[in-house]
Amino acid sequence: MAAGYRLACLSLLFSSFLLGCGGSGSATVTPPTQTQVATPAAVTKAAQNGAQIVSLSTTTSGASIYYTLDGTTPSKSSTQYLAPFLVTANATLKVYATLSGDTDSAVSSQTITANVPSATLVWSDEFANATGSNQLPDAATWGYDTGNSGFGNNEKENYCAAGSASSPCDPANPNAYIGTDGVLHIVARKPSAGVYTSARMKTQGLFSFQYGRLEAKMKLPESQGMWPAFWLLGNNIATVNWPACGELDVMEHINGSNPQNEGFDWTQGSIHGTGMNGGTQYHPAGFSATDWHTYGMIWKKGEVDYYIDDPTNVYATFPASSQTGTWPFEAGPQFVILNLAVGGSWPGAPDGTTVFPSEVQVDYVRLYTN
């Protein structure tokens, strides 16, 4: 009897648990409610000479958007949308959005007409200024990295957004401005002992592209600890981190003439990816980085080339087939960065010979079709 009584009690307790402690009828398990992710919308904006800038969005908060441009159905293995991107050829854009716990959106489709000829200018910032006073760079094109985290290179500078009044930044002495000369000035300053400010401008989240010929006409500083650069990072740095996102260094330059670079002046073009590092110096006789030069990159599928002053003057070629590690430059669009670092692992710290203020001058940044 005791054993039977215990079994009866256990059975009653289990039934009460299933029925909500004393409810009647059979137990019902209600599955969580699923909603369908909103179908993404595509908006195109004219760039230059027929090129289009595409922006994608969904009203479902937190959803991830994936797309293709060849008419195939997108999936999670397709390119993830992370920023507006340039389209220069006719394309069939297909897009969908997904969110864990919800049903995937429907796939939307849109035809993009952008049959741009080869060697055509499709995007640029000319840094024009006809106002009679210094102006801040276009906020629709350029954002900023900020702070003094060292940026992975033990750098010394505090990066300031344009017009920032957050100490030690000073809006009366901006680190990035377009002068009345129609030139972008990126300025490294020393507002007090051991304190340095500068700017790191980027198109991240605002503009990106994949493949083409990108160039900037620049004049560089030469002083101990100065590290100007013109470079790109993959939009997917937000999801796969560096170096898996890929890095394309169109131009890097440190210090100027010194024993480290064997007494001659030089700049360098490089590529970086997971397990992959390559760099080539440019140092012809009589070259001076303090003169105006055009620094350029030709990015095509499976290869990156760097040139100076003329696209036919290619001094570095990086084919994917000859690189070690993982080639990341087919994964999707990249964004553009212009900056002037102070100090760091490569150039070393500024010293008593370092000139402040020092500046990078940029006449223009231009992108052409291949």
Image: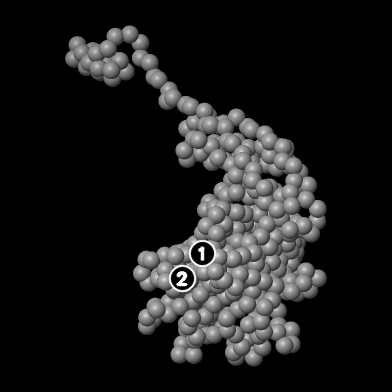
| 3D distance between C-alphas at marks 2 and 1 | 9 Å
Q: Nearer the viewer, residue 287 or 155?
A: 287
Discs 2, 1 touching: Cβ within 8 Å: yes
Which quadrant of the view contains residue 248? bottom right
Name the foreground residue: 177 vs 28.
177
Task: Tell me the tag on residue 174.
Answer: 2
Q: Residue at x 67, y 48 (%)?
A: 46
The percent coordinates of residue 145 (x first, y second) are 48, 63
**Quadrant in the picture for residue 29:** top left
Q: Is residue 81 above or below residue 221?
A: above
Seen at 63% across and 86% down, the residue is 261
Crowding at label 1, few (<14), some or many (≥20) Cα neighbours within 10 Å? some
Is residue 147 visible to the viewer in this orientation of the structure? no
| Residue position marked by numbered label 1 in the rendering | 136
Q: Where is residue 170 in the image (x, y as percent from the top left)?
A: 40, 71
- Mark found first going from the N terminus, 2 or 1: 1
Quadrant including the N terminus: top left
